[in-house]
Image: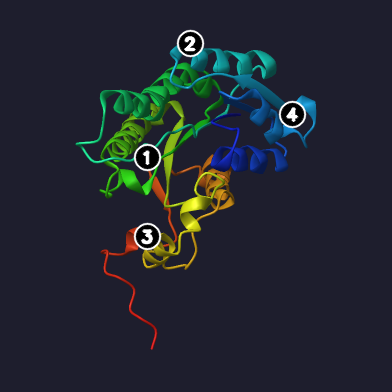
Amino acid sequence: MLVTGGGSGIGRAIARAFLEQGARVAVTGRHTAALRETVAEFPDDSTLVVEGDMAVRADVESAVTAVAEAWGALDTVVANAGLSEPGTIDELTDESWQRMRSINLDGLIYLARASVPWLRETRGSLTAISSVGGLGGDWRQVGYNATKGAVNTLVQSLALDLGRDGVRVNAIAPAFTATRQTQERLDDPVFWSALRDRLALDRPATPDDVARAALFLASPDAAYITGIILPVDGGTTASTGTPRPQAR
């Protein structure tokens, strides 16, 4: 299998979850040292590190080719690489929009185009890590949410086109997830209080929460599931946005 953006956070958790289940896992991303940290605890014959930028078509194609050449097949792809740069429409620059679109959307298109021929051979699956931001709006996330909304409809269209080939395509839509990159915001009591009001389960997601969903969607247990956008969000999208009542 191949995991993009596998050097940290959700991507690292997904790669390790599959390795712990005995899968052979290739990780790709821009930072080789971080990728090597992801797979360091696992046997060399079960892992592959491929440096590459998922916004660059040639790098995406090279990553897929490297996996196919190393193991002779490719049965599972998890498209995790992503980028968020907050801002209103007045703050969204051409450069920021290009960066987010090139990784979040263009990179997924490159990845699907390169991997689908191999997934047809194995009747495999492609899972995109999207966001609840692709299911609705957020304050100061106009560019990011636009790309994730496009990811969701792309996934649904791919699922329709590839179903008869036995290829399943789904997306996972996490809500705010606790990672090294987001910890500073969680440490802000004002932000945490506001976020907590949106969380039925009273905690943010962890990368492992998302990894377990990815394991399920790639497994035989999900053999009749395709074209879904699966929120892993602690109940965030169950709410209309009304604040949590104060405890009595």
Three-letter amino acid code at the position of disc 3: Thr
Residue 25 in sight in this render:
no
Residue situated in front as seen by the camera: 144 or 237 = 144
Left or right of 84 on screen, residue 36: right
Q: Earlier in the sequence, mark 4 or mark 1?
A: 4
Residue 45 x, y percent position in the rendering: 78, 25
Would you name the residue on which mark 1 appears? Answer: 227
SS state under label 3: helix
Three-letter amino acid code at the position of disc 1: Gly
Q: Quadrant of residue 18?
A: top right
Would you name the residue on which mark 2 appears? Answer: 58
Cα gap from disc 3 to disc 4, whole angstroms: 36 Å
Return the mark for residue 236.
3
Give the residue displayed 55% in from the left and 53% down from the top: 206
Residue 46 x, y percent position in the rendering: 74, 29
Return the mark for residue 46.
4
Cα gap from disc 4 to disc 1, whole angstroms: 29 Å
SS state under label 1: loop
Q: Earlier in the sequence, mark 2 or mark 1?
A: 2
Three-letter amino acid code at the position of disc 2: Ala
